[in-house]
Image: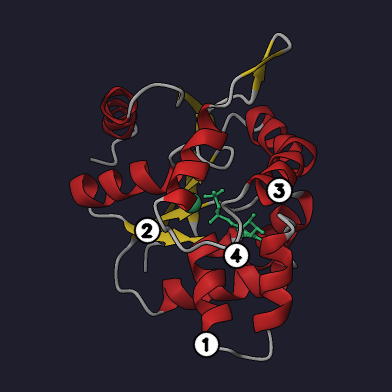
Amino acid sequence: MAKPTVVFVLGPPGAGKGTQSSNIVKNFNFTHLSAGDLLRAERNTGSDLADLINGYIKEGKIVPVKITCGLIEKAMQEDPNSKFLIDGFPRNKDNLDGWNEVMADKVDARFVLFLDCPAEVSGRLLLVSTERCLSRGAAGGGRVDDNLESLQKRHATYENETKPVLDEFLKQGMLRKIDATRDVDAVWTDVDALFREENLA
Ligand code: UDP
Ligand code: MG
């Protein structure tokens, strides 16, 4: 049996990972596995892990990899598709090490779609991604972490923990960076072209 194809989707909170992922699903028949959505679903079952997961999410911290990776593996096993988008993971070194230990040999990881949406450029604050999350929160998105306090923590986690993982993928020649500060259609034009170039269309 051929190993399932995996593409990771990373970028700061509000970069548009979920939005572009749903375009990829529609156009290229991937299954979308959002690590954040899997964690929120597990929390909502009220299992023994619910309080622990909710605490991490509110604080913008990264849930221990055994939990997240276990949810991803289970979701992959339950889905007959052979193409998976893994959105919002791996977002720190613990995530990457845990994934490599358990999953790396079981999949064909092709590349990382990096939706780049810098919070700061040359000392000037760009609030694009924060504003997107705040408007999602204000529109009743129902997330416990789309408020300014949680968002500041999520951004700090991204800067301190996720950026080193992106550097690691860059070194491995795995990173495909797209400017995600633009509107959805402009970003999609580039994402669409990338998936075609990578023979995933
Ligand atoms: N999270 C985590 N591990 C993951 C993915 C998400 O711990 O692999 C937690 C983390 O607390 C994060 C939150 O879930 O801040 C929301 O993640 P999601 O990807 O949904 O948010 P986004 O970055 O898309 O705004
Ligand atoms: Mg998301």
Element at badge 3? Answer: helix
Residue type indicated by callout 3: Glu
Q: Are marks 4 and 2 in contact (CB under 8 Å)?
A: no
Residue type indicated by callout 2: His
Task: Indicate which label's residue lies in the foreground, 1 or 3.
Answer: 3
Residue behind mark 1:
45
Could you tell me how far apart the alpha carbons at marks 4 and 2 are, in whole angstroms? Answer: 17 Å
Element at badge 1? Answer: loop
Q: Do the residues labelled 4 and 1 touch (CB within 8 Å)?
A: no
Residue that protrudes farthest toward the top in the picture: 122
Q: Earlier in the sequence, mark 2 or mark 3?
A: 2
Could you tell me how far apart the alpha carbons at marks 4 and 1 are, in whole angstroms? Answer: 25 Å
Q: Earlier in the sequence, mark 4 or mark 2?
A: 2
- Confirm if mark 4 falls within 8 A of ligand 1: no
Task: Indicate which label's residue lies in the foreground, 3 or 4.
Answer: 3
Could you tell me how far apart the alpha carbons at marks 1 and 3 are, in whole angstroms? Answer: 26 Å
Residue type indicated by callout 4: Met
Residue behind mark 3:
149
Residue type indicated by callout 1: Thr
Task: Indicate which label's residue lies in the foreground, 1 or 2.
Answer: 1
Q: Which mark is residue 103?
A: 4
Residue behind mark 2:
32
| Residue at (69, 40) in percent of width and height | 155
Front-lying residue, 3 or 90: 90
| Residue at (38, 80) in percent of width and height | 78
The quarter of the rendered structure image containing the C terminus is top left
Let me know if residue 72 appears in the view. Answer: no
Task: Indicate which label's residue lies in the foreground, 2 or 3.
Answer: 3
Residue that protrudes farthest toward the front in the picture: 138
Element at badge 4? Answer: loop
Q: Which of marks 1 and 3 is nearer the N terminus?
A: 1
User: Quarter of the picture for ligand 1?
Assistant: bottom right
